[in-house]
Image: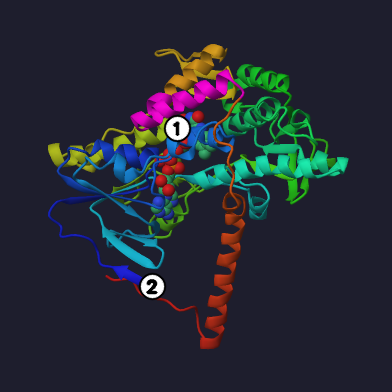
Amino acid sequence: MTSSPATSLRRRRQVVIIGSGFGGLFAAQRLKKADVDVTLIAKTTHHLFQPMLYQVATGIIAEGEIAPATRVVLRKQKNTRVLLGEVFDIDLENQVVRSQLLERVTETAYDDLIIAAGADQSYFGNDHFAEYAPGMKTIDHALELRGRILGAFEQAELSNDPAEQKKLLTFVVIGAGPTGVELAGQIAEMSDKTLRGAFRNIDPTDANVILLDASPAVLPPFGPKLGEKARRRLERLGVDVQLGAMVTDLDYDGLTVKEKDGTTRRIESQCKVWSAGVQASSLGKVLADQSDTELDRAGRVKVGPDLTIPGHPNVFVVGDMMAVDGVPGVAQGAIQGGRYAADAILAEIRKGQTPDQRKPFSYFDKGSMATVSRFSAVMQVPIPGTKWKFESEGYIAWLGWLALHLVYLVGFRNRLNTIINWFFAFNTRGRTQLAVTEQQVYARTALTELSYLERLRLAEAARADGDGPERTDTAG
Ligand SMILES: Cc1cc2nc3c(=O)[nH]c(=O)nc-3n(C[C@H](O)[C@H](O)[C@H](O)COP(=O)(O)OP(=O)(O)OC[C@H]3O[C@@H](n4cnc5c(N)ncnc54)[C@H](O)[C@@H]3O)c2cc1C
């Protein structure tokens, strides 16, 4: 393992941002004209627009359209540099962040730290489910899902066993939140429209798409009225919505479901998708181990009113990693949190504001949207000054979803390409991104096996040495 020394001479105040998602990128952009040096560290090279991942998974758009390279987005921002690496340690006492890229460990000193490392899929303690039911948080996930969905149709075409064909043409999406609803709707449309007539031995329109959830409603955050409308719309598309059904086991060939009355049943299905829960980045635990910081059940950091952790007014936690009452885990929560943290740093530099003079973070709810299918979405927007919300469902809400998501998509060319692909996909039954590679389908499993073998090797070496695994100290 090689290491890089703590970075740069301290000529200016050093602001370090972890994560290039909504929280991290918008915080960095807010500091564009500030008299500080900004270092943004992220484990991916891109800023990912997660709300459109389901369109990558179902072949409507290409991954590059929702994932511009972060360093290119920030190239004109001269006070900012971008480092690729996975942060594995935050040393609160010495104000240093440690990140790793391959064998190289980099230490980056900070005066102010904004942590926006987001969240991963949660399998509620059943991590082995991940092998058979990937989530959808990253580009890798979306491409793997695309491979699994299309791969199931390909395998069914080769089979002459009706039971096997049925298993291969049964797609189960677990979790009826916005991601699950969007994905189930699109798998149904893809099998019914895009793939219709493209096979000879099977009829893709026979595909059975099941949307499962332990809760009694679809899209619970949208309330019963919109949830019910979304459910009916999904059923019209042919999606089998099964509520009050909890997944208790999951394997390569299917899953076991427990009903409300305690009975269990089995669903045979090769292609399963998990969109049932989230777990915040493990960096929250790194903070909790060194300070009085507390985490909630989803591993989110209980921050103070100024989004900082106890005893460290220069360490902000924003976005999906923060636990703040009334702030949902959505893009706006992360954007507003990231900007708030940047503004607090700016106020300190420009106006000499002290941490105790900061106004508490206040979330402005701009509303929520979720697409159900082509030409159909649900939308809920608070009416300012009242406790009421404007609700809409159907075509108008769908147009609103398209417009809003275009606004937040980073990069002019990405917007243009997306509009062209949307036009094509929504007005014809064609989808331009149906290519699948072996790597997309198998790489995650292969990488898991490799890391298992590596752990075995280290354990072996430790046993041979008679002590713990070999360690290489990082530069200090
Ligand atoms: C499929 C899907 C659909 C969604 N749809 C919607 C929607 O329609 N509307 C909406 O408002 N919200 C939606 N969301 C939620 C929204 O995307 C998130 O709330 C938002 O992305 C959170 O922003 P963030 O900056 O906190 O985290 P993220 O955007 O997840 O960014 C986290 C960043 O941290 C980096 N990172 C993580 N760990 C480390 C580490 N250890 N070291 C270095 N870097 C690290 C990651 O690479 C990434 O760059 C959706 C989410 C998903 C997954």
Q: Give the residue at x 37% y 44%.
A: 20
Q: Is mark 1 within 8 Å of ligand 1?
A: no
**Tag 2 near tag 1, CB within 8 Å:** no
Amino acid type of the residue that numbered disc 1 sits on in the rendered structure: Val
Type of secondary structure dominating the magenta stretch: helix
Q: Is residue 199 left or right of residue 360?
A: right
Instruction: Give the x, y percent position of residue 49.
Output: 44, 36
Query: Which mark sits nearer the N-terminus, 2 or 1?
Result: 2
Q: Give the residue at x 38% y 49%.
A: 45
Closer to the camera, 467 or 5? 5
One can see residue 117 in this view: no
Residue where numbered disc 1 is placed: 327
Q: Is residue 340 left or right of residue 374?
A: left
Q: Circle 2 — which element?
A: loop
Q: Give the residue at x 66% y 47%.
A: 133
Q: Please report the bounds of the magenta region as a residue range.
A: 406-429
Q: In the rendered view of the protein, which quadrant contains the C terminus? A: bottom left
